[in-house]
Image (cartoon, rainbow, N blue to C red):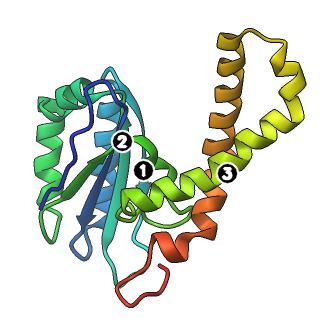
Amino acid sequence: MTTASFPETGSPLTVVVSRRVKKGQATAFEKLSGQMTERAAKFPGYLGATMFRPSSPEDPEYRIVFKFRDRESLTVWEESKERAELLEQIESLLVQPSEREVTSGIVTWFTLPGQNPVKPPPKWKMTLVSWLALYPAVTLVFVLFGEVLAQVPLLLRTLIVTVVVMVLMSYVLMPRMTKWFRFWLFPDRNGNSR
């Protein structure tokens, strides 16, 4: 089964592919997946990929997360013969057909280190947790540097503040916020955190 959201043209895209590999086929699968990544890397707009191996021997599911600059570059890759010929070989090693999800925007902030990617939380939860990180970050920037920033022209001031805040959000705050709120963002079916 394939699920996908279709973000605006021009937005960077994250694609999460879930593949459940037949017993005894992991080595062949990983070799083909490596070749797939090498081929994708040669396409314009490719931004990188990460493979998450199964979290336990009982669960043969691999997750491959890759990113493209925009919808157009992703489409060129997905319609390429380079991808098609390897995909056929990969699918023959699977218990069931691959599952694929395309996301963009702040969804990529909501991943848990050391774990396979999970289904993103609802947008309202992501928005609330993002705001809980963003508000104090912006406030702190203005408390610490407000007087200096007041001397800077508006466009430059906005540029400086947004760069600082986005770096803080992406590399410092959101990884921590996602970890701290994981019990609420990623509850399992029994109400426990994953």
Q: Which mark is residue 51?
A: none
Name which residue lies at 72% across and 49% down. Answer: 136
Mark 1: amino acid: Val
Disc 3 and disc 1 in contact, CB within 8 angstroms: no
The residue closer to the viewer here, 36 or 5, is 5
Q: Position of residue 114 (x, y in %)?
A: 55, 65
Name which residue lies at 34% across and 30% down. Answer: 11
The residue closer to the viewer here, 59 or 134, is 134
Read off the residue under disc 2: 104
Read off the residue under disc 1: 107
- Image vertical order of residue 110 relative to residue 34, above or below: below
Disc 2 and disc 1 in contact, CB within 8 angstroms: yes
Dot 2 falls on a residue whose secondary structure is: loop
Read off the residue under disc 3: 173
Q: Position of residue 126 (x, y in %)?
A: 46, 57
The answer to whether 184 appears left or right of 162 in the picture is left
Quadrant housing residue 24: bottom left
- Image vertical order of residue 105 relative to residue 91, above or below: above
- Image vertical order of residue 146 relative to residue 64, above or below: above
The residue closer to the viewer here, 25 or 125, is 125
- Image vertical order of residue 173 relative to residue 46, above or below: below
The answer to whether 82 appears left or right of 149 in the picture is left
Earlier-in-chain disc, 2 versus 3: 2
Earlier-in-chain disc, 3 versus 1: 1
